[in-house]
């Protein structure tokens, strides 16, 4: 089925394969734990927050160069000096799939940077304690999301909270490299409050995009059949912080020759 998505008023169309159905007459966030019910952005579902100073950000970025080179070495992919050049070495689909198979599920052990400090800050902002550990998972999942230029390395629109183990989380999208108005994460403001009866989507593990199958159900239509996203485009050192019920994804990278990378953290309510 064709997904028609407006990002900052520009139309993007792509095919999502799967079996689609509208959900039940229910607003999921009202039935589950809601990480954002005390904040002043609870009605829009997202905000932007300063989480790293320049020293911390640079350390994290340097750390990711090391992590990525370590992964790429396993597949005989040459090293890179800067993350923005990734597409120049991961220059085939096979190489890219080998890499993202690993970068989609990093853990705290991969990092030298103290991610607990980030959780402290988020706990203070939400007025609720969160931690990296997710009791529903054997180990925490930290994703380095990589989108090569001119490649359509995107996932379908989705709510993370469709997956039970992400229901009690808060979502952080942290720009790392190549992030700007042409590449940062699209989100649909207020969509965390949409009724499932207005959302056309696949079942879990039911969405395929450009030959890749996704765990999370893929969304192709919303109320009035229209999907309008914005790119908040946070600065380096900032993060988009949003409800796991907020619809997001399909971050097509429209930059000419720069790979875009972002880190996804999902601290869990204690
Ligand atoms: Fe997501």
Image: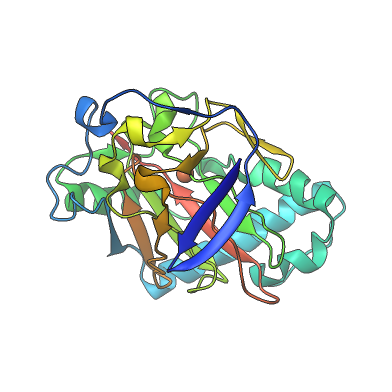
Q: Is residue 124 left or right of residue 154?
A: left
Give the colour scheme of this rendering: rainbow
> Is residue 95 shown above or below 178?
above
Q: Is residue 223 left or right of residue 69?
A: left
* Residue 237 quadrant: bottom left
- Asked if residue 247 shows in the view, the reply is no
Q: Residue at x 41, y 39 (%)?
A: 159
Q: Which corner quadrant holds the N terminus?
A: top right
Q: Is residue 50 left or right of residue 129?
A: right
Q: Residue at x 59, y 56 (%)?
A: 13
Q: In the depicted view, which residue is nearer to us: 60 or 26?
A: 26
Q: In the depicted view, which residue is nearer to us: 21 or 154?
A: 21
- Image location of residue 247, percent across then percent down: 39, 46
Q: Residue at x 68, y 55 (%)?
A: 68
Q: Is residue 80 left or right of residue 196?
A: right
> Is residue 195 shown above or below 56?
above
- Image location of residue 254, percent across then percent down: 61, 70
- Image location of residue 134, percent across then percent down: 39, 30
Q: In the depicted view, which residue is nearer to us: 96 or 59?
A: 96
* Farthest residue, direction front: 224
* Residue 270 quadrant: top left
* Farthest residue, direction right: 76
- Image location of residue 51, percent across then percent down: 33, 62
- Asked if residue 240 shows in the view, the reply is yes
* Residue 26 quadrant: top left
């Amino acid at each position: 089925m064709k997904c028609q998505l407006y990002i900052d008023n520009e139309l993007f169309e792509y095919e999502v394969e799967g079996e689609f159905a509208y959900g039940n007459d229910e607003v999921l966030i009202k039935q589950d734990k809601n990480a954002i019910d005390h904040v002043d952005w609870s009605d829009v579902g997202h905000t932007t927050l300063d989480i790293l100073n320049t020293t911390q950000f640079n350390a994290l970025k340097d750390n990711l160069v090391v992590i990525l080179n370590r992964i790429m070495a396993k597949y005989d992919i040459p090293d890179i000096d800067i993350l923005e050049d990734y597409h120049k070495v991961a220059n085939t689909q096979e190489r890219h799939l080998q890499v993202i198979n690993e970068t989609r599920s990093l853990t705290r052990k991969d990092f030298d940077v103290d991610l607990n400090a980030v959780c402290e800050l988020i706990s203070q902002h939400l007025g609720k304690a969160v931690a990296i550990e997710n009791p529903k998972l054997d180990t925490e999942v930290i994703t380095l999301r990589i989108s090569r230029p001119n490649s359509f390395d995107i996932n379908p629109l989705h709510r993370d909270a469709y997956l039970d183990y992400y229901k009690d989380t808060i979502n952080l999208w942290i720009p790392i490299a190549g992030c700007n108005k042409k590449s940062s994460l699209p989100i649909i403001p207020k969509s965390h409050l949409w009724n499932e009866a207005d959302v056309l989507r696949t079942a879990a593990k039911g969405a395929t995009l450009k030959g890749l199958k996704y765990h999370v159900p893929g969304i192709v239509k919303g109320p009035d059949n229209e999907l309008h996203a914005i790119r908040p485009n946070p600065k380096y050192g900032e993060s988009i912080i949003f409800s796991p019920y907020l619809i997001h994804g399909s971050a097509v990278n429209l930059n000419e020759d720069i790979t875009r990378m972002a880190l996804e953290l999902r601290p869990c309510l204690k």
